[in-house]
Amino acid sequence: MNSKIAKALEIVKIIEDAGGRAHIVGGAVRDTLLGRPIEDVDLATSFTPHKISKLFSKVVPIGIEHGTVLIRYDSESYEITTYRTEEGYNDFRHPDQVEFVRSVEQDLARRDFTINAMALNGEGHLIDPYGGQEDLVKGLIRAVGDAKERFSEDPLRMMRALRFSSQLGFSLDKYISDAISYQASLLSKISIERIAVEFEKLCKGQEYKAVLLHLEKLKVHHYLPLFKENSEQIKVIPSVRLQGFSELIPFYCEKGSPYEISEWIKAWKQSNLVKRNSLIIYEAVHSYDHKPLPEVIYPVPSHLIESLVNVLQAIDVNIEHSYVQEVYDKLPIHSRKQLDFKAEDLMKEYPSQTKGPWIGDFLNKIEKAVVLELIPNENQAIKEWIKTWNPPETD
Ligand code: ATP
Ligand code: MG
C-alpha cells in the first residue's frame, strides 16, 4: 500500500479511537484504484474542525467555514473536512450554505463525478454509492446526479470534466457532453484564475490533443479568454504536452496569436513570474531559426531550458532535450559576470573615449563572440581581438 495512504489510515484510526468516523476521499481513492501516483490525500470526518484541532498538534485552519483544516502528521499534510452538503450557489463559486451532515454517504453526494465520489474506511473497505469503480473500469467521467443541474450549481465542473478526461484518458458520458454544449456559457460566471488552473491541468494531461478538439466541438473556447475573440486559435494544438502558461503563451504567440504576451498575461490573470518566463522563452523560440543555438539558449536561465525545448517541440522543431542541455552545459560562459573582460578593461583600451552607450554595445559584441567561441574567454585574447576593430566613434 502507498505510504501516504497507510499514514492517512493511521489518522483515520486516531479519529475512530476518539469516537469519531473518518474516511479517505476523492482523488486519492480514485488514483489508488487506478494504480496512479497519488497527489494529496484528503480525508472526510464526522468530527467538527474544533474537535479535530484538539486531536492533532499541528493544525492550520484553512477553511473553517467550510469545515476544512489542514493537519501535519508524520511530516506530511492532510486536509480534513467535516462531512457536509452544499446548498445554493448564487455566486457560482461558493455554496451559500454548507451544512454538516452525519454520514460519509451524504458527503459523497456533493462531489462532482462518480470516480471522485468514493471513500475508503479504516479497514480499507470501499464506499462507492454511485458506481465510481465501474466507471473507472469503463473509463468514463459521469456526474453524480443530473449533469445539467450539477454544472449549473458550479460551472467550473465543466472544465474539471474536460481536465479529468485529459489526465485519465477517460471519455465524457453523453449527459456530460450534452450538458456542456447546452450551458458552457455559464463558465462566464467563473473566475478566470480557477478556469486557468483547470486549463493548465488539461494541457498537461496525456490526452490533451483529443480533449482540446473535444473542447472546441463543445464550444467551450467561446468562454475562454482570447480564444473567444480568436476562435481559430483553439485548433492550433501543441505537438507535445506543455507544462503551464509559461509554455502555452509563448507557443500561441509563436503560432500566430494576434495578442501579445502581456495581453495573454492580463486576459488569463497570470503572475509576473509567468510573464517573465514567457517573454524569455518566446524570445528564444522566436530567434531559433535565424540564430546559432548557443546564442539562442545563452540568455535562457538553466531552469527554463526544459520549457524552451518543450515549446520548440510543440511547434514541430525536431530537437532533443539532451542535446540542448549538452550545448547549454558546454557554453563557455553563462552570464556577463563570467566574461573575463570588464567595462574598465574596455575603457583602458580606448582612454580618449568618454563613457557612453558604446561600452554596452561593445561588451555585447564581445560576449556574443565568446558565447559563439569565436574567441576564448581570456582577458588577453579579448584585448587582442578588439584591437582588430576600428576605434569606436565618438559623438
Ligand atoms: P487532483 O489529483 O487534481 O488533486 P482531485 O480529485 O483530488 O484531483 P481536487 O480538486 O483536489 O481534485 O478535489 C478533491 C475532491 O473534492 C474531488 O475528488 C471531488 O470529490 C471534490 N471536488 C473538488 N472540486 C469540486 C467541485 N467543484 N464540485 C464538486 N466536488 C468537487
Ligand atoms: Mg486533490
Image: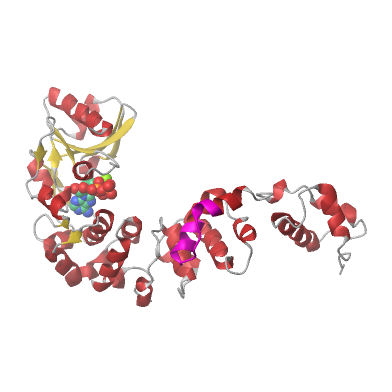
The answer to whether 304 appears left or right of 75 in the picture is right
Compare residues 79 and 286 and report the one nearer the observer: 286
The answer to whether 5 appears left or right of 294 in the picture is left
Question: Can you give x and y, in whole percent of width and height, for residue 377 in the image?
Answer: 76, 49
Magenta span covers which residues?
308-323
Q: Is residue 8 visible?
A: yes
On screen, residue 242 above or below 181: above
**Residue at the (25%, 73%) spot, across then down:** 217
**Residue at the (53%, 60%) spot, across then down:** 281
On screen, residue 381 above or below 127: below
Magenta stretch encompasses residue 217: no
Compare residues 160 and 383 and report the one nearer the observer: 383
**Residue at the (55%, 54%) spot, across then down:** 324
Question: Can you give x and y, in whole percent of width and height, for residue 108 in the image?
Answer: 12, 46
Q: In which quarter of the image is residue 93?
A: bottom left
Question: Can you give x and y, in whole percent of width and height, for residue 357 in the image?
Answer: 78, 62
**Residue at the (12%, 65%) spot, across then down:** 175
Compare residues 289 and 20 and report the one nearer the observer: 289
On screen, residue 325 above or below 275: above
On screen, residue 339 above or below 81: below
Q: Can residue 91 be seen in this view?
A: no
Q: In which quarter of the image is residue 290?
A: bottom right
Furthest residue toward top: 17
The answer to whether 41 appears left or right of 353 in the picture is left
- Position of the C terminus, as image quadrant, is bottom right
Compare residues 193 and 389 and report the one nearer the observer: 389
Q: How many marks?
A: 0
Magenta stretch encompasses residue 316: yes
> Most prominent secondary structure in the magenta stretch?
helix
Question: Can you give x and y, in whole percent of width and height, for residue 278 in the image?
Answer: 50, 60
- Position of the N terminus, as image quadrant, is top left
Give the color scheme: rainbow, by chain, secondary structure or one colour: secondary structure
